[in-house]
Each structure stands twice: as structure tokens, then as C-alpha cells.
Amino acid sequence: MFNFSHPLVKLVLAGIATSALIGGTVFGTLHFTDKQVKDVSTIFGSNAKDAQTHFMSLDKFVISLNGEERPHYLLLELDLKTSSLTAHEELIRYRPVVNNVLLKMFSQYSYEEMRDINDIDYMQKQVQMNLAKTLLENGFMYNIDDVLFTKLVLQ
């Protein structure tokens, strides 16, 4: 029937074998990576309980501000919003870094500069960006979803 020693038959058979090998490799890779993604999400707790919003309230900050006539003070309270319990628990460990970022950031302002800031949303975003940058530099691998000022008093 077929002459398996003919070069054209050998070429067709080699093509079929190569296609089967490539198809099997692609199928196996897709199957394995799909299974791995599911396993990783289970390890890191992507269940519904972990996907809830979490808030970490920070202690009151009282920061000295230089004024034209006399020293002034800024009283600041804020909450940090995260979208996972794991991030929230890790953030508690990084509280000293968070406190340091806030102290450095707000102590640069004078009383007059703080008084002239009318955009609280902008300030919250600035705090969020500074925190994200510094926390990442210190090994914190999660996002802070939002920074919420709960009290801001200038005296």
C-alpha cells in the first residue's frame, strides 16, 4: 500500500508527529498554568472574606508648622483603605513607615501653605502616592486603595 521509505511519506509523517507534539505541549501548558493560577489564588486567600474592604485608622498626628508670626500645629487623623485582609494585616506591621512618611510630608509645609490648600482630594492622593512609593521601597507588596482624612485641624 504505502511505501514508508518514500521521502514524501516520511515528510508527511514527520509533519503529523510534529503537529501532535506541539498540540500536546500547548494543551499541557495551558492546562498546567490554569491549575497553577487556581492554586496560587487559593494560597493567597482570594476568597470572598478576604476580598472585603478593610480600613486601618491611624493615631492622631500633631505636626508643628512654621508660621509667619508664631508656630502653628496641624492635627491630622486618617484611615488607609485596603481591599484584602492580607494587605491590612501587613500594613499594621508597616505602621512606623507610614507614620514617618506622614511626618516628613506634612512638616515641609508652613501654616500659610496648609491654610491655602483647598483641595483635600489632591492632598489625599499625594499622601497615597508617597505612601505607595515608600512602602514599596520597604518591601510592602500590596496596594493602598485610598487615603481618607477623617480630621484635619489647623491651629
Image (cartoon, rainbow, N blue to C red):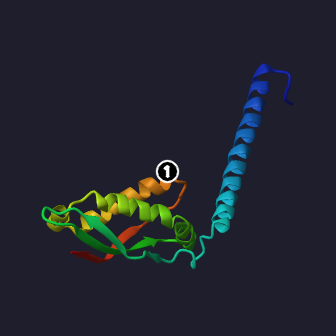
Question: Where residue 100 sits: x, y (%)?
Answer: 42, 61
Viewer-proximal residue among 49 and 105 = 105
**Residue closest to the far front:** 70
Question: Where residue 12 sits: x, y (%)?
Answer: 74, 30
Viewer-proximal residue among 113 and 34 = 113
Question: Where residue 7 sits: x, y (%)?
Answer: 78, 20
Q: Where, by quadrant of the figure, is residue 44 drawn?
A: bottom right
- Residue 22 relative to residue 3: left or right: left
Q: Label 1: which residue?
A: 137
Please determine whether, in this image, residue 40 is positioned above or below residue 149. above
Q: Residue at x 78, y 26 (%)?
A: 9
Q: Give SS at disc 1.
A: helix
Q: Residues within 10 Å of mark 1 (few under 14, many from 20)?
A: few
Q: Residue at x 37, y 69 (%)?
A: 147
Q: Residue at x 36, y 58 (%)?
A: 104
- Residue 18 relative to residue 60: left or right: right
Viewer-proximal residue among 48 and 74 = 74
Q: What is the number of callouts on the image?
A: 1
Quadrant housing the C terminus: bottom left
Viewer-proximal residue among 48 and 95 = 95
Q: Amino acid at mark 1?
A: Glu
Quadrant housing the N terminus: top right
Q: Residue at x 34, y 62 (%)?
A: 127
Q: Where, by quadrant of the figure, is residue 123 drawn?
A: bottom left
Q: Where, by quadrant of the figure, is residue 99 drawn?
A: bottom left
